[in-house]
């Protein structure tokens, strides 16, 4: 456990879920480390909720387990409801990168689409080395600020009101170019 603070309850449930997924596949920490490219010690600390996993780490694990980040996070949240009031929408923070992610859509494992609100602080730079699910469709609608998105080697400069639609097959990068940060809506559709 972190010495400076108590572990976040979501991180505790997330760590337990990550350990369950690894056990369900019959993998050791070493085998998962080879498949994901994440060190055994980092995986172990995340499973024990000694550290809050970063978005990049969760993305790598989602790729190995064949699920989106929203699917993984919804597995550690409460039972799905048809309506989630704004105040009850779970927010996950990657403090190391300046990324906050709000699950807007009520989670449901049988549905392919979901809405996520993303916020990046000024200068934040998120790089994903692979999609969590190959061929994932994403629509990024910038609500406030500006965002640079790189996919398949092409950089897109998005200002407030702009929307980018893409299918994710390889690495992507999200950079906040606005001094005040950026807030965007991400619509995700599993293939």
Image (cartoon, rainbow, N blue to C red):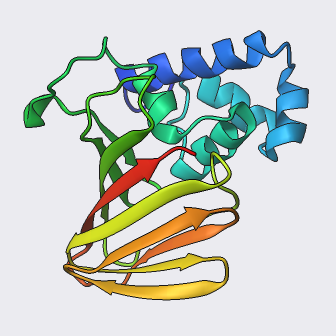
**In terms of depth relative to the viewer, which is nearer, 136 or 3?**
136
Identify whether 63 is placed above or below 32: below
Q: Where does residue 101 sit, x and y in percent of width and height?
A: 34, 48
Q: As drawn, is 34 to the left or to the right of 72?
A: right
Residue 73: quarter of image: top left
**In terms of depth relative to the viewer, which is nearer, 169 or 88?**
169
Residue 125 visible to an observer of this rendering: no
Q: Quadrant of the C terminus?
A: top right
Identify whether 131 is placed above or below 141: above
Q: Where does residue 152 sit, x and y in percent of width and height?
A: 66, 77
In the image, what residue occupies the spot 61% across and 30% down?
Answer: 46
Q: Where does residue 92 sit, x and y in percent of width and height?
A: 35, 40
Residue 4: quarter of image: top left
In the image, what residue occupies the spot 68% across and 35% down?
Answer: 66
Q: Where does residue 169 sit, x and y in percent of width and height?
A: 68, 62
Residue 63 visible to an observer of this rendering: yes
In the image, what residue occupies the spot 45% across and 37% down?
Answer: 112
Q: As drawn, is 107 to the left or to the right of 126?
A: left
Q: As drawn, is 105 to the left or to the right of 114?
A: left
């Amino acid at each position: 456990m972190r010495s400076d603070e108590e572990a976040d309850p979501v991180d505790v449930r997330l760590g337990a879920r990550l350990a369950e997924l690894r056990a369900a596949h019959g993998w050791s920490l070493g085998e998962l480390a080879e498949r994901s490219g994440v060190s055994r010690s980092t995986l172990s600390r995340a499973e024990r909720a000694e550290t809050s996993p970063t978005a990049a780490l969760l993305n790598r694990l989602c790729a190995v387990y064949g699920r989106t980040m929203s699917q993984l996070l919804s597995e550690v949240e409460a039972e799905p409801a048809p309506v989630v009031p704004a105040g009850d929408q779970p927010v996950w923070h990657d403090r190391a990168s300046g990324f906050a992610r709000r699950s807007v859509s009520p989670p449901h494992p049988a549905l392919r689409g979901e809405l996520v609100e993303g916020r990046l602080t000024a200068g934040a730079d998120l790089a994903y080395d692979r999609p969590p699910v190959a061929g994932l469709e994403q629509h990024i609608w910038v609500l406030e600020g500006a965002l640079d998105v790189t996919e398949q080697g092409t950089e897109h400069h998005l200002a407030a009101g702009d929307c980018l639609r893409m299918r994710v097959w390889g690495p992507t990068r999200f950079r906040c170019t606005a001094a005040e940060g950026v807030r965007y809506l991400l619509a995700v559709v599993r293939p």
